[in-house]
Structure formats: structure tokens, C-alpha cells
Amino acid sequence: MSRGGAIDLTGLSGEQVSEWLQSFDTVLCDGDGTIWQDDTAIAGAPDVVNALQDRFDKKVYLITNNGLKTRQELFERSQRLGFHLPSDRHIISPTAAIADYLVGSPQFDRTRHKVYVVGNAAIARELRQHGIDSYGAGGTEELPAGDKWPDFVAREFGNPEAARNVGAVVVGWDEYFSYCKMARACHILCSNPDAAFLVTNRDAVHKYPAFCIPGTGAFVAGIEACSEREALEMGKPNPLVLEPLTKAEGLRTERTLMIGDCLKIDVGFASNCGMLSLLVGTGRYNNLSDVRREKDRLPQPDFYLPRLSDLLNLL
């Protein structure tokens, strides 16, 4: 079977499906749009994930760009929705990846450094669980009425303490994003060249049926522009997020299947890591024609299913 062929699994024979199942030992499965929508499981998805683990002895990990929850909170959601993962170590999330990265960084000292967060409170909760102090997460910071930006800068950045011992700036999705937050992040990054600059993901826009809203990629782009620094992405499609599994668990990417709903993020991640890919049509692409229409612009999956639950009839 050719790579990137967008083969519809429902059109394969039983023998071909069996051959496909034997081509991978590990499954990485996206969350939103693939196995659940918000706090509701997509019909049949828990049965498929559990069958891959229990009947076919596959190692299954959930990998998400959702930076609004900690790894433990995502694990608790998976259990509540009927996914029988062995432990929270089978969740790969940006918040956990950021905390693990800082813990393992020789430039970051948890006894001395703190983290400035432009993002939501889940990032702070994850950092706290790893013994890392942070500030800014989940809060608002606006120019007071009648204040001008020179007043803000003089008051907030005139004191060297404003940037001292800040070992990292972390950017996530932030509904309270503001000029003041961008200015503070810029000041810290320009004052501390050795400070880490991390972002949960570069998803530029979140698309809903009736509207679109800016994603984390839009926020971090502004901070990158003014600080003249490039943030390190701690989510898909960056292969860096798989390093803990390849090192500690011996994961072989050539024997791994990535299941997701997004060509750019999920299939792109699989391509970057040398993994097989299965695209499901319960997210951005609800038919194979739409997928193939993107072949000159975006990476194509190896396999396609309208819904993950369709795999039940093939197993």
C-alpha cells in the first residue's frame, strides 16, 4: 500500500485490513474532532480505542494540542468518557510537554527561576505539579483608564526585578490577551536572552460551523515579532513532543499509527515523524473528496475513515 494514498479502509478486504493491523504496534490518537468533541465522546470511539488495546495488544496514547487542561485533567476526561488508558502517562499534552521540557533543561533552575505565562490557568497548574513557580496565567492585564503606554512601561519595567530570574515565557490560548501582556513578554525575552520561549501550539485559528476565532498561533506571532525570538512549539506537528516516548518507551515511529482529523496538524505530524497516518472525517474534512482536493497544498494521509467507529466493522 502506497504512502500518502488516502486509501479508504472501508474498501479493503478482510485480509488487507489484517495486514494493515499488523503494520503497527503503537497508536497515537488525537482528541478533539477524532475521539471526542468537548466533553462528549464521539459515538463508537471508546470501543475502537479499547479494542486496539485489549484485543489487538496495541499501545495507545492520546496526543492533543489542547493546552486548556493539564495531563491529569485530560486523563480524567478520557476515563470518564470510557477510554481505558492505563495511566496519565498515556496522555501527551502541551502543558505536560512544557513542564517536562523545563524540568529537563540545564538552563532552567526550579529553585531560582519562575515562568511568565501568557495563557490560561491550566499551564500554571501543570507547572505547579512539577514544582515550577509561575505568574500571569489566567489573569487580565490592561492599561488602566487614562494611562498611556509610556506610563505602563516606566512603572512596570523601570525596575530590574521585572525580568530578573524569569527563566521562561510560555504562550498558550489566552482570551485575555492584551498589549500589556505582549509588552511584558517582549521585555522579559529581550532582557533574558537565555530564557526559554515556548508555545503550546501554533494553531492559528479555531474553526466552528458558524464562526472562526484566533488561536494560539495568532498570539505568539505578535510576541515573536516584537521580541525577535522564535518560540519552540510544544505540540503537534513538532516531532520534539515524541522524544520522551522514543527515549523512555522505545517507541518506533515506523511501527506507529497516528489517527487524527486535521491534515496540517495530525497528518503533518505523522509525516514529520515517519509514522503511518489515518485521517477521520469527524473534524475538518468530512469526505474523501475534500481531502484529495488539498493534495497540492497539504500532506495526504495514508488511510481514511469517515468515522473512527467504522473501524469496528472491520476488526
Image: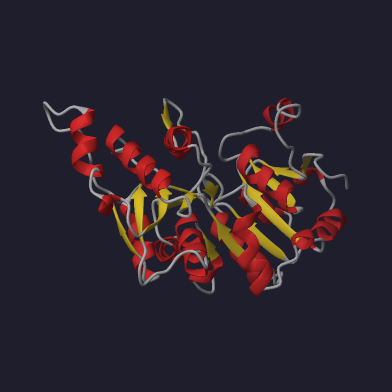
What x and y, as percent, mark residue 265? 61, 42
Residue drawn at x 64%, y 74% as measured from the top left: 248
What x and y, as percent, mark residue 39? 40, 51
Q: Most extreme residue toward the left, as rendered? A: 146
Q: Is residue 230 above or below residue 96?
A: above
Residue drawn at x 65%, y 41% as measured from the top left: 306
Q: Coloring scheme of the render? A: secondary structure
Q: Quadrant of residue 175?
A: top left
Residue drawn at x 42%, y 31% as measured from the top left: 214
**In the rendered image, which quarter contains the C terminus?**
bottom right
Locate residue 189 relative to residue 162 in the image: left or right: right
Q: How many marks?
A: 0
Residue 181 is at least partly visible in this image? yes
For the residue pair 109 and 28, the one nearer the viewer reads as 109
Residue drawn at x 85%, y 51% as measured from the top left: 13
Q: Is residue 251 above or below residue 294?
A: below
What x and y, as percent, mark residue 267? 68, 44
Locate residue 173 relative to residue 152 in the image: left or right: right
What x and y, as percent, mark residue 304? 72, 42
For the residue pair 117 and 272, the one nearer the viewer reads as 117
Locate residue 145 relative to residue 130 in the image: left or right: left
Residue 48 is at least partly visible in this image? no
For the residue pair 244 and 136, the one nearer the viewer reads as 136
Q: Quadrant of residue 257?
A: bottom right
